[in-house]
Amino acid sequence: MMGKHLICNVASYSNSQWSQYWEGTLKRSNANVGTFTSQNVMLMSAYGLTKNLNVIAGLPYIWNRSNGGHFSRQEGIQDLSVWLKYRAFRAETSLGTFALFATGGISAPANQYIPDMLPYSIGLRSKTASIKGIAHYKFKGFYLTGHAGYIRRSNIHIDRDSYQYDGVMYDTHEVMVPDVVDASARLGYINKYVQVEGFIDNMTSQSGDDIRRQDMPFPTNKMDQTQLGGMAKVHMYLKNGSFFTLVGQYSQVTAGRNVGQARMYTVGIQHTFNVTGRSSDLP
């Protein structure tokens, strides 16, 4: 949580690769695609409106390609996202600190990319609204965080006048995109200079169909996945009271449906400072 008048600017790079995927619940390889690689650069900022309310915005640029097949690389700016994060409760006791947070956000495509050429499409081009509840417990530097959220997705329009969903042909260019429930648990340690954690993330679609045999994915597909990973941060403080943070993260999809069994790493840098020029409010 950012304190009042604090701003954190983030630049990160992520690389995700897979050569096997789940066609429905069937795990398989696709030699025509080979190894699929998705890269993105994310720019994000968070600002403390008050000590209990933050506003966050992010915009990624994505490159998708494979070393097999005949599809050209797809790339471009994806979706602009904005969130509000509110600390609703905080209590300090001899047994540790407990806090509850709520976040709400919206996103919209920032580019006219193609959504129905998966997996090469850089996104689904769906407008979204999301809400999330977060519980956080900390004791002597060790912490446990859990969250659960719901993402509402709008229908999209594709550049064709019919498509097949769950075995039925629809003569329309408007396509339903499944809503998603996401959840996460994180266990870690943090002090003024370092932070390390392990995590498990899950994403479960609330509707959708499966990839048809020997076919490409489609925006209506039920895309579920569970991934395990770890993250580390190192903070470097400057004399003016601001600080830089180096971030590294690695994760692996361990179970899924209509998704690739991806492994992903992320590296990034953060700069946190007080916009008033004061350093007294920095953590």
Image (tube, grey):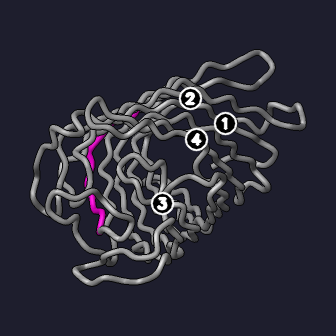
Residue bearing mark 4: 76
Q: Are marks 1 and 2 in contact (CB under 8 Å)?
A: yes
Q: Amino acid at mark 4?
A: Gly
Residue for badge 3: 124
232 sits to left or right of 22: right
| Kind of residue sitting beneath label 1 | Pro
- What residue is at 50 percent from the left and 72 percent from the top? 153
Mark 1 or mark 3: which comes first in sequence?
3
What residue is disc 2 on? Answer: 192
> Closer to the camera: disc 4 or disc 1?
4
Magenta segment's dominant SS is: strand
Numbered disc 3: secondary structure? loop
Q: Which residue is mark 1?
A: 283
**Pointer 2 local density, CA inside 10 Å: few below 14, some 14–19, many at least 20:** few
Which residue is depicted at the point 64% across and 23% down?
244
The amino acid pointed to by label 3 is Leu
- Examine the structure image and report whether residue 130 is included in the region drawn in magenta: no
Q: Is residue 263 visible?
A: no
* Position of the C terminus by quadrant: top right
Q: Which residues are magenta?
A: 222-231
Q: Quick one: SS at disc 2?
A: loop
Q: Secondary structure at mark 4?
A: strand
What amino acid is at disc 2? Lys
| Residue 7 marker | none
User: What is the C-alpha distance between the residues marked 2 and 4?
Assistant: 37 Å
**Relative depth, front residue between 121 and 22:** 121
Q: Position of residue 258 (x, y in %)?
A: 24, 59
